[in-house]
Amino acid sequence: MRRVARWHGAAHAGVEEELLLVDPATREAAPRSQQVLKYAAEHGLPSEDLDHELFRHQLETRTPPVTSLAELREHVVRARRAAAEAAEGAGLRTVAAGAAPLGSGEPRATRDDRYQAMVDTFGEVARPAGTCAMHVHVQVASDEEGVRVVDALRPWLPALLAVSANSPFYRGRDTRHASWRSQAWAGWPSAGPTERFGDVETYRRVCRELIASGAARDEGILYFDARLSQRYPTVEVRVTDVCTDPDDAVLVAALARGLVTQAAGPDAAAARGPAAGQWRAELLRAAQWRAARYGLAGQLLDPGTGEPVPARDVLEALVDTVAGHLGDDLALVREGVDRVLAEGGSVRQRAAYERSGGSIEAVVDDLVERTNRAATG
């Protein structure tokens, strides 16, 4: 997300999406991001919206910071359209899914000293990093406010993961998870839920100690589920899968922005929930696993009580918590919640698998079609 000098008015939000590059003939991930980016630059596509990722079968798209959900959707679609046109120019297709359904051989790191060092240092842990997430940036006034927000978000993040869950297939197999990406990503030593920090000094000290331990090379590899951004005046929510449907992406961003705004405000206790301060990282990991395993098809841990309850109950409580910050977008968010409860990303992928009689290739074809249909607006 690009920096602006100052942000005014309602909290700005922007998203970064990671997309897969797929060979339409083999349906496998294709390590050719450099050719795709070269095509974008040479053919006048908005290449400022596109970038490399850790592995060559990925592209990153990003939006500017905006306050309107309609505008955010326009920017998401614009960036996806640029990625799709550039990929097609290189003989490939884009896929918005949390993991590559088919194997792609040995992942090939992007030609970048930092990325190569990451693979050298973390070895096999880094290789599943070819999965694809969506990161939501939401404006905060200061680091002090940001740390309060990071602490308050913790019990709600599994619900955001469940809303986005979009990676049931990985390397030719049904993983029996709604979000396998989140489980593969959990292998990074700095990834996952965090204990409550309490203040900026503690947050910075933990970051320094993790880097000193070798668990991260720098602050960019501190893969907390929510963290202070290095580059922008934002809290970065990093827990979600990339969504095939841009409307689902906008729903996740709306809920994340609502939670951040609520947690930063004078009525912040409502965002934390009555038991927010009592959540240990072990229980947060359990909550995240339930969200990854079942998505919205099963029970989630209630952010207030820690008890398993129907996913619909958690999402209704989430919407009620942030409703005061949604304004005219409240009806859109309620409609989106009903939509993902009926058929989220992982459910749609499995439906394609069943319709085809059990073909992973058909799952990829369906993802290509829906991703690129969405890229046209």
Image (spheres, rainbow, N blue to C red):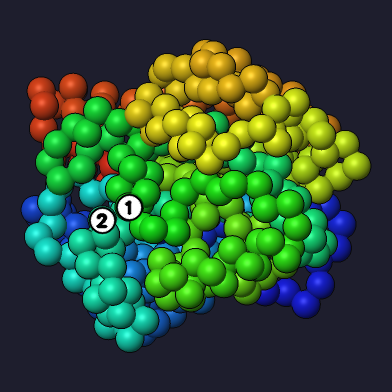
Q: Is residue 11 above or below residue 248?
A: below
Residue type for callout 1: Gly
Q: Which residue corresponds to mark 2?
A: 128
Instruction: Report whether 315 appears left or right of 361.
Output: right
* Residue depicted at x 44% and y 80%: 44
* Residue depicted at x 21% and y 61%: 124
Instruction: Report whether 277 appears left or right of 96.
Output: right
Return the x and y of residue 200 as percentages of the image width and height: 74, 63
Q: Is residue 21 above or below residue 152?
A: below
Report, in whole angstroms, how far the alpha carbon at label 2 lies from the one at label 1. 9 Å
- Return the mark for residue 187: 1
Return the x and y of residue 225 as percentages of the image width and height: 52, 50
Residue type for callout 2: Pro
Instruction: Report whether 194 appears left or right of 153.
Output: left
Helix, strand, or loop for circle 2?
Answer: helix
Q: Is residue 257 visible?
A: no
Q: Residue furthest right?
A: 266
Helix, strand, or loop for circle 1?
Answer: loop
Q: Nearer the viewer, mark 2 or mark 1?
A: 1
* Quarter of the image that includes the N terminus: bottom right
Instruction: Report whether 44 appears left or right of 268.
Output: left
Q: Residues within 10 Å of mark 1 (few under 14, many from 20)?
A: some
- CB atoms of marks 2 and 1 within 8 Å: yes
* Residue depicted at x 52% and y 46%: 193
